[in-house]
Image (tube, rainbow, N blue to C red):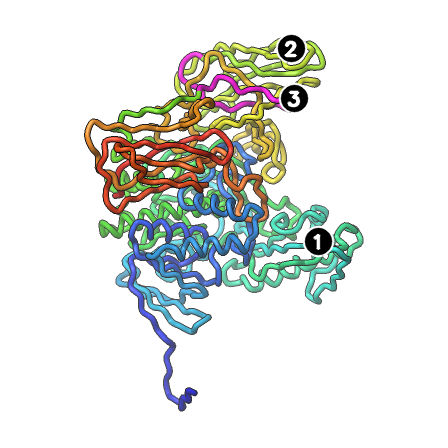
């Protein structure tokens, strides 16, 4: 028994921590910042005010995490974010292809807990700070609600990924709330007061079908008269539960920080009212056996503060895809704004316009312009309200979080101010380290000089030419335009033939298209158009000579335009770095197969050509004459570890039963790290929850491999791999003049290797 007499003064338990980097906020941005920094040797304290990690991606909110791929509904091919967030999404797809939010929670907790350099404080809210001087944060104080403990954490560097920017706000960091006027950043899309300046919050719910009727009595506070009070009520259907009701949004006219509890109550009122409508209006008899399985207890927040860095990314950076010397990450979601009146607005739930490809995010957006040791992450980064409409989505914030974590490591090692990472040599090192860690930076033209691969003589067991994709028995009806996206080489374009079946004689139009900007996958330029004669019958080949000379390597679209009664034979074979798309719209992403940009909006009008998700998305049977050497060994020397401008992929010939890569040096090399990059289909969106995935592991990915030294000794082996990036570290450096990489098996299709790093860590 403990008996405590009355005392005049009592203190909370207080724990003092000293670390290298303190991160406020455990959403996907904060998690990826923490893991990246920790793996570089940085001691991290990660403070999260919720019982789980993930923020809007957690089981508390249950929004799917997404980014540049946009459900595969835009023209951003092979655009899934790389690095730590890709590792997490691959693992989630492997363990949780059904999209259970609880499993995603557990995975995030596991990933953070596995890092010995991370001290994780859950249920702990930052409440105050101490500053060393006007521009320097010295420490933060946080309170744990579960164990009544105060934490005082000091560190030389801080990162605010808290969503509402509590650390940046208390430290005096310059910030903005609301929309800029159109003339400040030359943003024609800037909203007026009728549309509103802030996006609101949303609460989601899940339903479940049972084996008997389930009654529902609505709570007294539930919204009545849905059909009169919600202008878009006719969009509610028996299928529109969960995130399909993202547009049940509220609070954009309020203080989205301090009025959150009031906003939450209004959203509960709306959500329970919608469920009452589905269950008791009599309009949805199919809902009789459904029960309300889960209702969110906190809203998913979209917008509040944005902090000013040395650069503010704006509409033109996204639409014009501007290139920046300090680019460290990329985005690709549409500029996606919502009316501030939310669910009570008569306007569409969102207004969104896409760029023609992915865009760069500069490092200058990832720190405070007036606090010398403060990084900003997540939706807080330095962006205008318009650009925020794109940069705010979670996998984009996770991608920038990796850049922040690596920058923090560089600053810790060199004792830099956060801005000093911009210095030329520092930025070169930062980008190199990011690339080695799996980050994708589009149009990044630097070669990693520390990669011993570039000093080796490369030999491979075979090379797959892009020559023939054999026909199967399944047909693709030409009721819509279809295209094969393929990597073309500089010089004369080969003849292309498709295998077809036709019910009538006549002609069909074939087009060869490219993107006006090399690196994009928007087929906005017709290089050649030919009318080709077709005959009645089955399994015939139509050949087309487009008579085109290319002045550089690039991806092209071989398009077959619609024709009634015509079908193309598909193939049973899938091939890495090659894809089928169709000129259609994905209703989750676009209202039409053509983005019709309003005049004066600053956006482009263009066509969407998008793939079908597996198990669909089969390739057409096709021949190239002569063959394209698209998958030769030199593709391993390119800058990217995914298809971009070129295939950046080596594939062994289909007849090669023992594919391998051999690296030979004239003298022995000291090797402490090997990184292998395999193909996990960077076009697949890999949404974290709700969306099911056909494949647990991506079929091109190498499952079983061995790495041998010059003496033929196995120095590394994995028979259960399902990740794109495999990092092999050796406690004692290996001395050898040869490395052999044997690819023993995959998850179903021909093995593809996207890149190799040989050397040591910085």
Residue 592 falls in image quadrant: top right
Placement of the C terminus among the 4 image quadrants:
top left
The reply to whether callout 1 and callout 3 are in contact (CB within 8 Å) is no
Q: Earlier in the sequence, mark 1 or mark 2?
A: 1
- Would you call the spot at circle 1 few (<14 residues within 10 Å), some (14-19), or many (20 or more)? some
- Residue drawn at 51 percent across, 24 percent down: 485
For residue 344: magenta? no
- Residue 62 pos. (x, y %): 56, 53
Q: Tell us which disc is closer to us: 1 or 3.
A: 1
In the current view of this chain or complex, which residue is farthest to the bottom?
5
Q: Which residues are magenta?
A: 465-492
- Residue drawn at 33 percent across, 53 percent down: 38
Q: Earlier in the sequence, mark 3 or mark 2?
A: 3
In the current view of this chain or complex, which residue is farthest to the front?
712
Foreground residue, 247 or 91?
Answer: 91
Foreground residue, 125 or 133?
Answer: 125
Asked which secondary structure carries label 2, the reply is strand
The reply to whether callout 1 and callout 2 are in contact (CB within 8 Å) is no
- Residue 434 pos. (x, y %): 34, 41
């Amino acid at each position: 028994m403990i008996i405590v007499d009355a005392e005049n003064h009592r203190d909370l338990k207080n724990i003092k921590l000293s670390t290298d980097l303190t991160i406020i906020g455990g959403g996907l941005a904060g998690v990826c910042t923490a893991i990246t920094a920790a793996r570089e040797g940085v001691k991290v304290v990660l403070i999260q005010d919720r019982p789980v990690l993930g923020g809007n991606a957690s089981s508390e909110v249950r929004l799917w995490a997404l980014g540049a791929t946009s459900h595969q509904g835009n023209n951003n091919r092979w655009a899934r974010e790389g690095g730590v967030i890709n590792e997490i999404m691959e693992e989630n797809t492997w363990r949780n292809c059904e999209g259970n939010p609880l499993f995603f929670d557990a995975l995030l907790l596991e990933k953070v807990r596995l890092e010995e350099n991370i001290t994780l404080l859950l249920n702990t809210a930052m409440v105050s700070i101490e500053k060393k001087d006007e521009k320097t944060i010295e420490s933060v104080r946080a309170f744990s609600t579960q164990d009544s403990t105060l934490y005082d954490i000091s560190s030389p560097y801080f990162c605010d990924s808290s969503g509402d920017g509590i650390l940046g706000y208390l430290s005096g960091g310059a910030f903005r709330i609301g929309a800029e006027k159109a003339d400040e950043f030359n943003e024609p899309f800037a909203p007026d007061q009728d549309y509103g300046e802030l996006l609101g919050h949303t609460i989601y719910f899940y339903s479940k079908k049972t084996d008997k009727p389930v009654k529902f009595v609505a709570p007294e506070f539930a919204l009545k008269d849905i059909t009169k009070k919600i202008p878009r009520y006719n969009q509610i259907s028996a299928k529109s539960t969960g995130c399909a009701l993202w547009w049940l949004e509220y609070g954009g006219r309020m203080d989205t920080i301090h009025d959150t509890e009031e906003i939450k109550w209004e959203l509960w009122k709306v959500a329970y009212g919608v469920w009452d409508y589905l269950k008791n209006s009599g309009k949805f008899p199919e809902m009789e056996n459904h029960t309300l399985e889960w209702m969110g207890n906190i809203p998913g927040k979209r917008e509040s503060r944005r902090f000013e860095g040395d650069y503010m990314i704006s509409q033109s950076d996204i639409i014009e895809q501007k290139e920046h010397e300090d680019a460290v990450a990329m985005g690709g979601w549409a500029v996606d704004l919502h009316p501030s009146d939310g669910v009570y607005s008569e306007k569409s739930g969102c207004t969104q316009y896409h760029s023609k490809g992915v865009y760069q995010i500069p490092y200058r957006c990832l720190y405070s312009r007036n606090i010398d040791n403060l990084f900003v992450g997540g939706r807080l980064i330095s962006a205008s309200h318009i650009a925020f409409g794109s940069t705010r989505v979670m996998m984009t914030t996770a991608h920038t979080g990796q850049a922040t974590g690596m920058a923090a490591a560089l600053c810790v090692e060199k004792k830099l101010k956060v801005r000093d990472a911009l210095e030329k040599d520092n930025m070169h090192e930062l980008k190199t380290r990011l690339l080695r860690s799996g980050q994708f930076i589009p149009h990044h033209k630097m070669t990693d000089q520390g990669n011993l691969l570039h000093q080796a003589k490369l030999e491979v067991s075979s090379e797959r030419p892009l020559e023939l994709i054999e026909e199967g028995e399944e047909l693709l009806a030409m009721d819509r335009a279809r295209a094969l996206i393929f990597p073309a080489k500089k010089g004369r374009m080969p003849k292309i033939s498709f295998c077809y079946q036709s019910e009538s004689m006549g002609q069909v139009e074939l087009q060869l298209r490219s993107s006006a900007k090399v690196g994009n996958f928007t087929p906005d330029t017709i290089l050649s158009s030919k009318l080709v004669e077709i005959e009645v019958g089955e399994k015939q080949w139509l050949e087309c000579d487009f008579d085109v000379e290319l002045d550089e390597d690039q991806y092209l679209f071989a398009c077959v335009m619609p024709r009634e009664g015509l079908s193309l034979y598909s193939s049973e074979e899938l091939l890495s770095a090659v894809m089928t798309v169709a000129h259609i719209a994905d209703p989750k992403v676009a209202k039409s197969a053509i983005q019709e940009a309003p005049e004066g909006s600053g956006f482009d009008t263009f066509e969407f050509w998008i793939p079908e998700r597996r198990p669909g998305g089969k390739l057409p049977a096709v021949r190239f004459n002569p063959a394209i050497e698209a998958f030769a060994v030199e593709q391993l020397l390119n800058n990217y570890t995914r298809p971009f401008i070129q295939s950046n992929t080596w594939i062994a010939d289909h007849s090669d039963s023992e594919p391998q890569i051999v690296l030979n040096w004239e003298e022995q090399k000291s090797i402490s790290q090997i990184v292998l990059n395999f193909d996990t289909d960077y076009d697949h969106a890999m949404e974290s929850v709700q969306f099911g995935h056909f494949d647990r592991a991506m079929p091109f990915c190498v499952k079983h491999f061995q790495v041998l030294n010059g003496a033929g000794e196995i120095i590394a082996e994995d028979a259960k791999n399902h990740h794109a990036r495999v990092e092999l570290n050796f406690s004692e450096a290996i001395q050898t003049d040869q490395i052999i990489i044997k690819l023993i098996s995959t998850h179903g299709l021909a093995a593809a290797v996207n890149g190799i790093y040989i050397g040591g860590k910085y």
